[in-house]
Amino acid sequence: AQKVTQAQTEISVVEKEDVTLDCVYETRDTTYYLFWYKQPPSGELVFLIRRNSFDEQNEISGRYSWNFQKSTSSFNFTITASQVVDSAVYFCALRDQAGTALIFGKGTTLSVSS
Amino acid sequence: SQTIHQWPATLVQPVGSPLSLECTVEGTSNPNLYWYRQAAGRGLQLLFYSVGIGQISSEVPQNLSASRPQDRQFILSSKKLLLSDSGFYLCAWSVAGHWNTEAFFGQGTRLTVV
């Protein structure tokens, strides 16, 4: 069965701190995709990144970086030099070939104070 | 470009009243469509998905139903709302025939049942 676990319910940091959001997933498939979404206070989910199970290269996009490790079934998200605008709920999601839709974790609420 | 519209943005309904939430997608054909519900502390729960007109799959048995009367229209309904139906409802779409693509979300409807 598919499952996504985001053990961190809430994280609070001060501006300019680095912060890592953890994501652990479970799937029986060898082919699957992982996603991260951001949900700002407005409520709309904003797609951030998609990663397939065959590509374990880390990815960096500006202040965002993602660390995918199949050995530990983790897909962690790091924000470098956090800013107040990064305050949001962040969701990790999984979809494999057996799935009908994205399966989401419960989300991590990030609060960045100035 | 593709856009997704969802309305209303907020809704307060008494227990036992009916519900109709509407979602439309523009700029794409035959999308996969989804309804998710976000309850406090419970992440995003997939309620329904549709791969075509009149084709609806339910993920969780409940007091709600969905319909797809047109290719790019997805409706979430209830005949009699329960208090437990309160939550944030999100409609989403993804490209048909590609199980590995991300989903794009509407702005959501915040439903409060009183």
Image: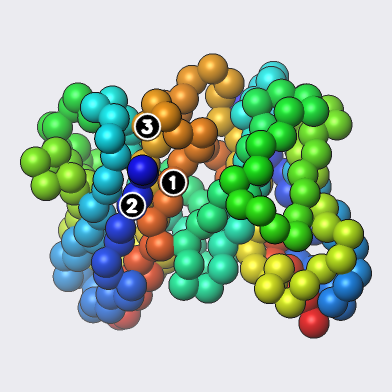
Name which of mark 3 and mark 2 comes first in the sequence: 2
Q: Secondary structure at mark 1?
A: strand
Whether pointer 3 and pointer 2 mark residues with C-beta atoms closer than 8 Å, the reply is no
Label 1, on which residue?
A: A103
The reply to whether residue A85 is in sight is no
Nearer the observer, B47 or B38: B47
Name which of mark 1 and mark 3 comes first in the sequence: 3
Image coordinates for residue A92, horizontal then vertical, percent? 35, 51
Label 3, on which residue?
A: A96
The image quarter containing residue A30 is top left
The image quarter containing residue B72 is top right
Image coordinates for residue A43, horizontal then vertical, percent? 57, 61
Name which of mark 2 and mark 1 comes first in the sequence: 2
The reply to whether residue B22 is in sight is yes
Whether pointer 1 and pointer 3 mark residues with C-beta atoms closer than 8 Å, the reply is no
Q: Residues within 10 Å of mark 2 (few under 14, many from 20)?
A: many
Q: In screen coordinates, is B96 left or right of B52?
A: left
- Amino acid type, callout 2: Val
Q: Secondary structure at mark 2?
A: strand
Label 2, on which residue?
A: A4
